[in-house]
Image (cartoon, rainbow, N blue to C red):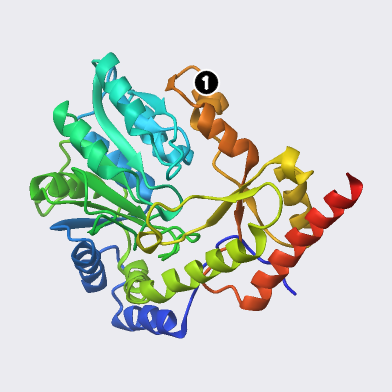
Amino acid sequence: MSRIYLSPPDISPQDHASVEAVMASNWIAPTGPALDEFEATVASRVDRSYALALNSGTAALHLALQVLNIQAGDAVICPTLTFAASANPICYLGAEPIFIDSEPLTWNIDPDRIKEALETHKNIKAVIVVHIYGQCAQMDRITELCELHNVPLIEDAAEAFGSSYNGKPAGSMGDFSFFSFNGNKIITTSTGGMLLSNNQERIEKARYLANQAREPVIHYEHKSIGYNYRMSNLLAGLGLSQVADIDRRIAGRRAHFEAYKEALERLPGISFMPLAKPDTANYWLTCLTIDPVESGTTRDQVLAHLDANDIEARPLWKPLHLQPIFQDKISIGGEFAAGLFDRGLCLPSGSGMSNSQRQFVIDSITDKFKQSTQTL
C-alpha cells in the first residue's frame, strides 16, 4: 500500500475537464470568465454579496486588515489554536496580536476570553475568529461582543468551506470572511483563497490593492502600494469543478470520522474532538486526543508508529502563544489550547481515501495500543 497522506487533493475527471476547458479557451491570464464565475458561485453558495478570488487565504486576511485600516499600535484579537497564517498578516501591518485560548465545546476561540480582552485592552481594532478543523465557533456570542464594542469581525473560514452555524453558511458572517483553497483543504485550486463581504466598497478597495493598486487608466498609474494577490482564471476553472463536488467531499470525510470514532473511541485514553452539532461541520480533519496515563502511550509515540507504517498524521496546531516568534505577545489564557496540542492528533481524512486505507490506519493505531497495554 502506498503512503497514506493526511489530506491530499481529491482530483476527479470532472476537474480535469474543467481545467482543460479553460486551457482551450486560452484565458490563461489572471482575469477571465472562469474567475468571474468562481467568485459569483462561491458568493452565492455562502450568501455573500461580493467576493474576490486571491492567491491565498493569507492574502485575503492581509487585505481585510488593510481595508479596515489596521496599523502600527493597534491590537487584533486572534485565537491561539490556529495556523500562523491567522496571525502573520497582523504583524505585516505593524499591529499586535492578542492571543485567546480555546473553549472545550468546539476547541474554537473562547467568547469569555474575548470579552475579557475587549474590556481590558482599549486599542483592539478587530477580532479574527477561526473555525478550527471545519467546525464553526460560537458566532452568536462573538458577533454580539463585537457589535457591543463596535469592533469589526473577520471570519477566518479557511478550513470550513461547507460548514454552517445556526443555519448560516461558514463564510457568511462577520464584516469580512475568507476561505483557503490550498491543496490540503476540502476543495482546492492548488493554491488560492477568497475574500468575501456584503460591503461592495470594501471588496473593491481590496480588489484594487490585490491588482498592484493599478489606477483605471490606459497606462500604468499607481497612487498606492499594491500587491500581486489575484487568482488566475486557470485555477478558478479547477475551483468551479471542486465547488460543484463539495457535498460528496463532506460526506466522504464524515464517513471517515464516524468510522474512526466507532473503532477507536473504545480504546483507553482516546477522546475525539467534540462536535456541538454534527450536521453543521465539514469534517475537514478527524482530530482526537490521547491521554498518556490512561492509554499507556503518548501522542508522539502513536505518530511515530503511524509514520513507520507509512501513514501521515499530524499534531494539532501548536498554539501561537507558544511559537518562538510570538512568545512576547499578549496571551489571555492558553492552558487549554496547550493541553490540546500536547495530546492532540489529526488522522488521515482525505475525501479520496479508500475504506481499506482507513482500515489500515485504524488497525495501526489499535496495534500500537495493544503493544502499549502489553508493556504495562
Residue at the spot x=78%, y=44% of the render?
Answer: 297
- Nearer the observer, 311 or 277: 277
Q: Is residue 38 above or below residue 196?
A: below
Report the side of 12 relative to 138 (left or right): right
Instruction: Out of 232 and 266, give the one closest to the viewer.
Output: 266
For the point 37% across and 72% down, the residue is 246
Kindly indicate the quadrant of the structure image that contains residue 27.
Answer: bottom left
Residue 374 vs residue 294: left or right? right
Amino acid marked by disc 1: Gln
Q: Is residue 83 above or below residue 274?
A: above
- At which x and y percent is residue 36? 20, 67
Q: Toward the viewer: 58 or 158? A: 158
Residue 212 visible in the picture: no
The extreme right residue here reads 375
Residue 318 point in image, percent of width and height = 56, 36
The residue sitting at 27% across, 20% down in the picture is 74
Q: Is residue 92 left or right of residue 70?
A: right
Where residue 342 sits in the image (x, y, percent)? 64, 36
- Identify the residue under disc 1: 327
